[in-house]
Amino acid sequence: MDANELRQQLRPRAGGPLPKDDHIKHPLVKAYPWGYRQWYRRIERSSLQALMGSARSRDHQLALKVANCSPTQQCGEVTLCWWCKVRASLTEGEAIVQFFETKIKRDRFSAVTIILACIPYEERHTLRTRLRQIRKRLEWAFRLWPRSQWYGRFELDLLTGHRNQELGSYAEKTLKDMGYAPQSAPECVLVHAHLVIYHPRISRDAVRSDLHHWYSACRQVKVTSLRDEQTTEEALTRFGSYIVKFKPPTFALYGRGSRTFRPRHPDVVRQYVRLQRRVRHENLLIQGRAGYQKDE
């Protein structure tokens, strides 16, 4: 598929599905929930329209690379491509199960979300260095818990200060405590992390207390148990799939009920894509063990 063919396929109402969309029921992705596969496909289509509307040839080349992805020649663009994103999610689910011993005590597993930093967008060139520093501090904290194990990923959100940016009241208060004013501050990158932590020697309340001590802004830390209705393996698999998600700000994508999936703010979508591609997918990983010996 060349640029002209892609433009034709993306035309509102007159276009049609991309050749790669025929693989949405492929056996390699069939294990992933149907609704999420469809949702990722719609996000990809909206993002491709934004990229093809750019004046930069580099954006057009990226759009073509994603559009021509197939099960035999994967593009590897997890940020954009629905196929690569679903495959990465399934792989991550398997990896997290292999990382932990699923027969160990379930009540010593905790799912943790931490809002870590707001980095001004104009300082995005320092993002990889800042992530290394944040990871180092996180792992220092986790190693204080004997025999703890952790697995998760950083997630990067683009905050634009737009009046339609989706921030709940608690998130706004958290960001305000961290020094960010959504309606007046310049654009920034919100860094947060989703992790599963195994803490055999201390309780979940102790984990929550320690994290609240180190990250003290309002609702900066959320610590919960794994879902009761799922087995340990199912819960870890679902969590592993959940932490591999890349979605531009909702207000910038297509509107509710849209059949064309035309982005409402294509410049923001392009900005988000460029931000995510600054950090390699593997560099978002957070994993480690503290004083752990398998034969104990």
Image: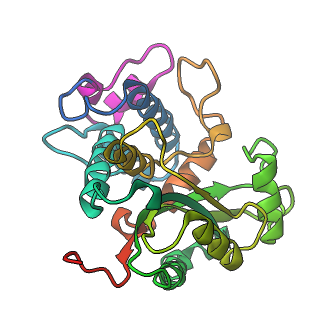
Looking at the picture, tell me which residue is in the foreground, 3 or 157: 157
Question: In the displayed structure, would residue 17 be above or below residue 62?
Answer: above
Quarter of the rendering occupied by the C terminus:
bottom left
**Residue 37 visible somewhere in the drawing:** yes
* Figure quadrant of residue 87: top left
Spot the residue most to the top: 14
Question: In the displayed structure, would residue 54 be above or below residue 41?
Answer: below
Residue drawn 22% across and 75% down?
A: 294
Residue drawn 29% across and 55% down?
A: 102
Residue drawn 34% across and 42% down?
A: 234
What x and y, as percent, mark residue 11? 46, 22
Looking at the picture, tell me which residue is in the foreground, 88 or 151: 151
Question: In the displayed structure, would residue 38 be above or below residue 119?
Answer: above
Q: How is the image coloured?
A: rainbow
What x and y, as percent, mark residue 210? 63, 76
In magenta stretch: residue 17: yes
What x and y, as percent, mark residue 15? 41, 18
Question: In the displayed structure, would residue 211 be above or below residue 232?
Answer: below
Quarter of the rendering occupied by the N terminus:
top left
Residue bounds of the magenta highlight: 1-24
Image side of residue 216 versus residue 295, left or right:
right
What x and y, as percent, mark residue 56? 48, 53
In magenta stretch: residue 273: no
* Figure quadrant of residue 126: bottom right
